[in-house]
Image (tube, rainbow, N blue to C red):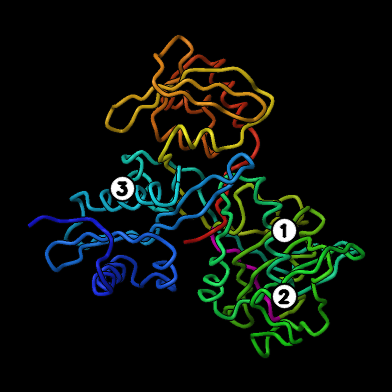
Amino acid sequence: METRVRTAADDAEFEGYLAQTRHAFGKVPYDHATLRAHGVTAVAVRGADVLGGGLFLPFAQHFGGRPVPSGGVAWLAVAPWERGAGLARRLTEEGTDRLRGEHGAVLACAWTPAPGVYRRWGWESAAVASGYALDPAQLPPPAPGFETVLPDGTACARLRERLAPDWNGPLRRPDWWRGWKQRTTEGALTVGVAREGEREPCGDGPGGDSRDGHSPWGDSPWDDSAWGDSRGSHLAGYATVTVEPYRPWGVAAVVHDFWHDGLDALPALLAAVSARSPQVRQIRFRRSVLPRANALQWVLDQYTVHEEGWYPWVLRLLDIRRALEARGWDPQPRGGVGLEVVSPQGKSAPYVLTFEDGLMHVQRGSHPSARTVRLPSPTLAAWYAGGLPLRHAARLGMAEGDGRDLALLDALAAGPAPWLPESF
């Protein structure tokens, strides 16, 4: 009997997909009704049996300082007895094709512990994530001039949108994202730090956190009765935090979102997260909350930080021409070079790239010349994200071309480093 890959026809088929996520992950997607409502669902069906499925979420990501139409692959699951038959690839292609056709996505990303599987489909690792843990007793004292506040959602979004273009990968979060995260991190509190004496326009009210002078955790290490209100303050940083028991006693402050606009704000924000309370025995940053090149090494007097490696996020360009033209590039390099992109199946696609003032024009169908750089499609994706310089790729046998042209393209992509702070 034929196995079809398509949108779930009804709630029963979607429930069949959720059953497969339980087999694969031991749980179902968090607040899956919201993800289904705002994303694309693909299922593999044979007769009345649902053999797998995935969720595909449309959003924009910052690359080279510009928002690029993108999407995320999440909760991809195939029945254990059907694995190895190519269903995961068919589901991924169906979902990303729909992201491209229905939402204009030119690239897609995913978190995966199996990058080699995705690599065979044309994806590549952009950056590996890590979680970090530190002892609050080792924190340096915060600099004077900061106050702890309860920021509203508008102030947090404004700060994040100002900082996100400095990296390759952060989402321009859709309107539904904040409410979804609040439901999936029950009991979370968002704390912030503001520079004293600096003012900005008021926001739109609380971002789902307690604003009545009492912690949403009840009798907790946080005494927020003395904290200010961020409306009217210049927010320099914020963190969204939950607490977990810490053995043999006390709690760990678990950080789910963490943004700050300068090194001077970091100690003040860490102090707000720890609440300067002996109950907080550890600050734990969940995977990908901090970039691998984070600022802790430049602010801690004693670097007693424990790093826990996680798996990478991977990237694929769904539309090479449009993805290259949508991205921002360094404004200094100018000129042109040929590009030949080779798919995992060995098919070649030639392009001519011309660039000036941080913009790129891409023409499809040119003939390779002596100034043609030849890249496998996975290498192109990793370079696009800032995760793999082409000169390094050439040493690894992952790129071919004249060293001067490889250096020119690397200079073009210089700047933001890869970081995907969102989990989905």
* Residue carrying label 2: 205
Which numbered mark, 1 or 2, is in the foreground of this view? Answer: 2
Where residue 369 sits in the image (x, y, percent)? 43, 10
Q: In the rendered structure, which amino acid carries the disc numbered 1?
A: Leu
Picture quarter containing residue 320? top left
Residue 161 appears at what percent x and percent y? 67, 54
Q: Earlier in the sequence, mark 1 or mark 2?
A: 1
| Residue at 55% in and 21% down | 354
Q: Which residues are magenta?
A: 279-287
Of helix, strand and loop, which one carries label 2?
A: loop
Task: Residue 83: name its quadrant.
Answer: bottom left
Can the viewer see residue 247?
no
Which of the two discs, 1 and 3, labels the residue nearer the N terminus? 3
Circle on res. 382: none
Residue 320 in sight: yes
Amino acid at dot 3: Glu
Q: State the residue at coordinates (56%, 74%).
A: 182
Q: Main secondary structure of the magenta part?
A: strand
Q: Seen in the image, is 253 located left or right of residue 266?
A: left
Give the camera-side residue of 162 and 276. 162
- Label annotation for residue 93: 3
Residue 389: % across, % down: 54, 30
Residue 285 within the magenta-colored segment of the rendering: yes
The residue identified by callout 1 is 159
Which one is nearer the viewer's eye here, 412 or 367?
A: 367
Q: Quadrant of the N terminus?
A: bottom left
Q: Residues within 10 Å of mark 2 (few under 14, many from 20)?
A: some
380 versus 231 height, above or below: above
- Badge 3: how crowded within 10 Å, few (<14), some, or many (20+)? some
